[in-house]
Amino acid sequence: GAGRATRGGGVVGERLMRIGEVSGRTGLSLRAIRHYESVGVVAPSGRSLGGFRLFTESEVRRLVLVRRMRPLGFCLDDVRALLDVLDRLPGRGGPLPENDEQAYEELVAKLRKYWVRADARCEDLRRELETAEAFARSLHEQLAHLLDASVAGSEAAR
């Protein structure tokens, strides 16, 4: 572990991780994590006595979500807004606004909007992947044809 000495708002007794471990867990570079910190997407829970950023499991989960959003083409404002929506979901820290019907409908509408965009982008990515796979197959076929011709040429030379 990274230790528990902090100057910040981590939960007492919660395991804190230094940025290198967070990078390994999220697949994000140190630079990307620092960038997301600088633009307000994630904030370390504190710093070690030596000044190292310390993150909790909650911040790691948040960064994993950000990483999963990246291929979907969400801009930073969308990332922040979607994280805000997700933070307000029941079980994620926010109480269900069941006694406030307008807040509930707004939450549903925002989540639906992001789902529709994500789903459409996934469809675009599937089409792009099909095109890339067709290209890779054509290269494989050309290579196979070239190798077959080379073998046939070698056998004819004997």
Image (spheres, rainbow, N blue to C red):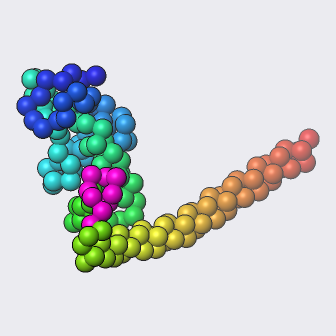
Give the left or right position of residue 51, taking residue 61 as reference: left
Closer-to-camera residue (118/10): 10
Q: Residue at x 26, y 70 (%)?
A: 99
Rendered-image quadrant of the N terminus: top left
Residue 54 among those drawn in magenta: no
Q: Residue at x 51, y 71 (%)?
A: 123
- Say if residue 117 shows up in the picture: no
By secondary structure, the bulk of the magenta-drawn segment is best described as: loop
Give the left or right position of residue 142, taking residue 34 as reference: right
Give the left or right position of residue 11, taking residue 22 as reference: left
Q: Is residue 52 above or below residue 126?
A: above
Q: Residue furthest front?
A: 99
Q: Is residue 5 above or below residue 60?
A: above
The image position of residue 74, as x and y in percent, is 32, 65
Q: Residue at x 17, y 40 (%)?
A: 44
Q: Residue at x 24, y 72 (%)?
A: 100
Closer-to-camera residue (120/130): 120
The magenta span reads: 89-97
Q: Is residue 66 above or below residue 55?
A: below
The image position of residue 146, as x and y in percent, is 74, 54
Quarter residue 9 falls in: top left
Give the total number of marks visible in the rendering.
Answer: 0
Quarter residue 109 falls in: bottom left
The image position of residue 88, as x and y in percent, is 27, 60
- Say if residue 139 shows up in the picture: yes
Rendered-image quadrant of the C terminus: top right
Residue 93 among those drawn in magenta: yes
The image position of residue 12, as x and y in percent, is 18, 30
Give the left or right position of residue 12, taking residue 125 as reference: left
